[in-house]
Every structure is written in structure tokens, then in C-alpha cells.
Image (spheres, grey):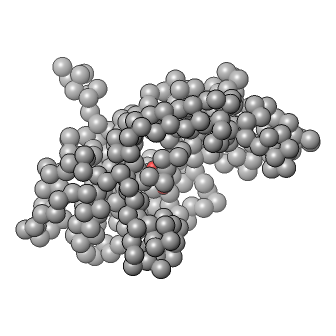
Amino acid sequence: MIAADRIMTTVGRFAPSPTGPLHAGSLLAAFGSWLMARRRGGLWHVRIEDVDRVRAVPGMAEQQLTMLQAFGLDWDGPIVRQSDRDALYQQALDRLLAAGEAFVCHCSRRDLEASGGRHHGRCTASAPRPDPAIRLRVPRGTRVAFDDRVRGRIEQDVGEAVGDFVLRRADGLWAYQLAVVVDDAAQHVTEVVRGADLLDSTPRQILLQRRLGLPTPAYVHLPLLLDAHGRKLSKSHAALPIDAASPLPALQHAWRQLGQAPFADVQDVPSFLDRACARFEPARIPPHDHRLCDAP
Ligand code: GLU
């Protein structure tokens, strides 16, 4: 009985890259994934995705965690940092290399263009490089389909759309796609809830799960907040900063952006979050992004 309950537990996660402060768009993703897990009494982990050491800003992860605390979004277990997990990524890569699913690639951008660009299946470099990348072999016609709980059926020809994608970069850094798949499995994540900017990455991640024999979690892609030019807010100058000193209005705003019916009479964050957990209806999450006209 206990074992069956454990198997049914929802495990969600929020996985910010420590490249800038949390803003209204990242709060939406954090709050949405927290709600999806907590409404069922599930677990919610926070993972710092600092795998790209070049882009990670020192001190930013701590600032992001302080923000989550100010917004009452409590997490379970220790914080996982990708920069501590080289050995796990290496194991996964070694398995893919040993199985012939991945290959060492010395190709420069020019070599790739000359060999058709995307799905060359093997290295065609004109000269070896001291710093080769490692790619996943993705033959033509490799199609992946999944049912996103908000956006419905999504299908991608991964061979056509991306081809042999990078698992370890030429600069020696782990690619996001490999790290996220290894980490979601290692943390037993059952439900990946995140912004729709990553919808396009999901077929690659499912493909990697299949090649590594890992389970595929459920996927829920939340609306993005876009500026008036249709750019994701974090990528524009108007990143809509959130104020940790007055968290309630930002949470109420995110609640509405998640398509949920507003409710009154709550004066503080803990009562708002309790009420939100009880009333949250995933079926109301809009399957489209929000364009905010007040952005430049
Ligand atoms: N680290 C990614 C980001 O901040 C999110 C990855 C994910 O949720 O899978 O955009």
C-alpha cells in the first residue's frame, strides 16, 4: 500500500538558470509548476541549472532562491546544482558512446554545412580539432510525438528540425539537453512544468530518454509573457522585475496569467497559496502566450 502511494506521488521541479534575477515570466513558471505538484500533495524540487558556467552569474542562484522563499514557494530536499553533477552526465554520455548512439565530432560549422548541415550521422571533418563535440546520432525520419497537457499533441521530426544534436560541447561544457534529461530522471521527476519556450526542446529530451532507457515524464508547457514585439520578456529589456517586498500582487498576476479565476479576501501570501492550491484548475491554463502591451 505504501509502495503504491509512493509510485503515485507527483514530483515536479523548477530549474532556473542563474543568468539573471527572477522576473514575472520565471515566477509564472515557478508558481505554475509548484501548483501542479502541491495541489496533489506532491514533491517540488529546485535545481540550479548552472551547467553553462560561462553564462552563470555568481551569486544569482542565491538571489533566485531568496526570491522563491519570499514568494512562499517552498521546495523539498536539497537544492541540486548541475555544476556538481559532472560524473552523472559523463556516465550517461559513456553509455551512449558505447552503444554507438553518440559520436565524437570534429566538424566545424563549415564542415557541417558542406555535409548537409544537420543529419550527417558521423564526423566528416576535414581536419581533427583538439576540442571535438559529442553528438547524438539522429537519423532522418526520427519522429517524436507527445501529448502536452496544455498544448495538446506535439510532433517533431527531430532529424529534420535539429539533426545530430550536441551532448557535450566543443568547449567541454555539457549541453542543456543531456543534463536536463539525466537530472529529471535522477530526481524521479514525474511532471515537467515549464515555459513554452522549451516546447521545441521536449522531443529531443524524449528521444534522449528513450536512448538511455529512462522514463518519460508528463509535460506541461505554460504560457510565456511576451513583449509587444513577441519576444520572451527575459530576452527583452522589459523583463518585468518582481518585487520580493510585496509578493502578493505578483502572485495574483501570475494566477490570472495561468487562466485561474481570481478570488478576494486574502491578505497574506500563505493564505493565498493555500487557497490557490485548493482552487487550481489545470484545464484553465491557456494554450497560448500572453503579449504584454506595456512593454516596448
Ligand atoms: N534552465 C532552463 C531555463 O531557465 C529551464 C529548463 C527546464 O525547465 O527544463 O530556461
Say left or right for 189 vs 178.
Answer: left
Say left or right for 193 vs 113.
Answer: left
Residue at the spot 68% in from the left edge and 29% down from the top edge: 139
Observer-nearest of 132 and 53: 132
Say left or right for 82 vs 150.
Answer: right
Q: Position of residue 50 (x, y in %)?
A: 54, 54
Furthest residue in direction right, as rendered: 127
Q: Give above or below for 162 relative to 247.
A: above
Residue at the spot 25% in from the left edge and 63% down from the top edge: 256
Residue at the spot 29% in from the left edge and 52% down from the top edge: 285
Observer-nearest of 116 and 88: 116
Q: Give above or below for 244 relative to 96.
A: below
Furthest residue in direction left, as rendered: 265
Q: Position of residue 216 (x, y in %)?
A: 44, 31
Say left or right for 251 vs 149.
Answer: left
The number of numbered badges drawn on the structure is: 0
Q: Give above or below for 50 relative to 140.
A: below
Q: Position of residue 16 (x, y in %)?
A: 45, 56
Residue at the spot 17% in from the left edge and 59% down from the top edge: 261
Q: In which quadrant will I find the N terminus?
A: top left
Based on the displayed image, in which of its 4 quarters is residue 295 positioned?
Answer: bottom left
